[in-house]
Amino acid sequence: MIDKITFCIPSRNNLRYLQDCIPSIRRNLTAAEHQIIIFVDEDTDGTVDWCEKNKEVYNFRYIVNPNLNKSRFGIGPAYDKCISEAETEVVMIAHADMVFGRDCDVNILKQLKKKTVVAATRVEPPNYPNAGEKIQKAFGQYPEDFEQDKFDEFVESQLSETKTTEGIFAPWCLYKSDYDELGGHDARLHSCREDSDIFNRMLLAGFTFVQPWNALVWHYGGRGAGSNTKFDNEEDRLRHEKWKHEMNASTREFIRKWKSQVRHEPLMKPIVNPVYDIGIRIFNGNLNLIATLEPFFTDVYTDFNTLEYIENEQYQTTENLLSKFHPLENLGGQNDILVTIDGNTFNQNTFNQLMLLSQIIKNQNQTGKFKLDNMEVEISRIEEKQNELIKIK
């Protein structure tokens, strides 16, 4: 029976949280032989010094970004580096701002099979909306006020729970060989949305998702990343502002790849839209409209001068935007599907209909022309391309 896991934990100035996370793995989990690998991506808070002093105390390894404090490695590549160094058959992606409850590992491993991803159930402070995928309890906001004893008591009360649901969020666990088949994380999603991307790819590759509700972790609600919107000091506010910028850029990259916004069921099972080769013709374009629509389409044909947009946006994407934009009259027939809109009549309902377009195309499954709201759609070929995105080449 598999009983050893390698815990892969990136850290970006997360000493405050690592000091709770790492001891909890050794204190509350069963196998002393579990490996722990920390990737230190940024350190202005003494993380490396703490790791050096405590690596033998808690029996962990740490890897330091070779360009520490000069450039970020990124969370996806950091996970990949940790997994590449793992010596166990099973790996677990975890966040630094998580505290593991008793027997979390045992109850996860009971559910683990090949081509299966098992996620622990998060217990969080009531700062975020809850669609039913997590448990919300007021055990504290920061490590300094975390009520460990109350959390431990709650974990004990849940160990006999038999409920499982079909969803995924960190921490998640799978066989290293299954992970390697996907090619790891997509470095294009450098700072955020790397999880949504790999979850989509897992779904398309036929993975099963299992979330057992007797495998619990305390999660400080994204404070380690900076996504938590409630902060009590300037440092946390600045961290959140940086996270917002990175999340916006990564979300736009996710859309450029998947031609869709992030979608999932209430309990966090991903939903993947069909991906088609769609070009869009925009009459009476403007900067805001171009910025709104560009990520969703393979090519953009417009009467608007896009050079200013390209200059401002190019540094945030791996795509060559200059080759993506074309004059309105330069069609060339290179897209399977072509949408034509008038910027003067574009409104929220138009956008909402565009977001449904891939599903409409799939349901109709026929070539030809039709009207959609105030748009014209011409389909010359129907070929779904999402399965081409499963493996990172």
Image: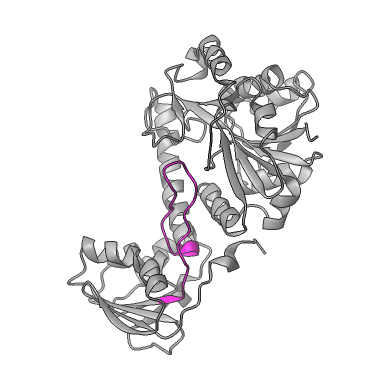
Q: Position of residue 76 (x, y in %)?
A: 61, 48
Give above or below for 244 relative to 97: below
The answer to whether residue 72 is visible is no
Image quarter where the N terminus lies is top right
The answer to whether residue 129 is visible is yes
- Residue in the image at 54% along x and 12% along y: 153
Q: Position of residue 393 (x, y in %)?
A: 67, 64
Find residue 328 and report its image quarter. bottom left
Relative to 146, 87 lies left or right:
right
Q: Nearer the viewer, residue 39 or 377?
A: 377
Q: Is residue 54 magenta?
A: no
Give above or below for 199 relative to 359: above
Q: Is residue 273 magenta?
A: yes
Give above or below for 124 relative to 321: above
Range covered by the magenta-colored residues: 256-278
Give above or below for 202 relative to 163: below
Direction left: furthest residue: 345
Q: Position of residue 302 (x, y in %)?
A: 32, 78
Number of marks in the image? 0
- Residue in the image at 55% along x and 50% along y: 194
Find residue 125 and report its image quarter. top left
- Residue in the image at 39% along x and 66% along y: 359
Magenta-colored segment: predominant secondary structure: loop
Find residue 292 and report its image quarter. bottom left
Q: Position of residue 151 (x, y in %)?
A: 53, 15
Q: Nearer the viewer, residue 46 or 97?
A: 97
- Residue in the image at 58% along x and 45% along y: 209
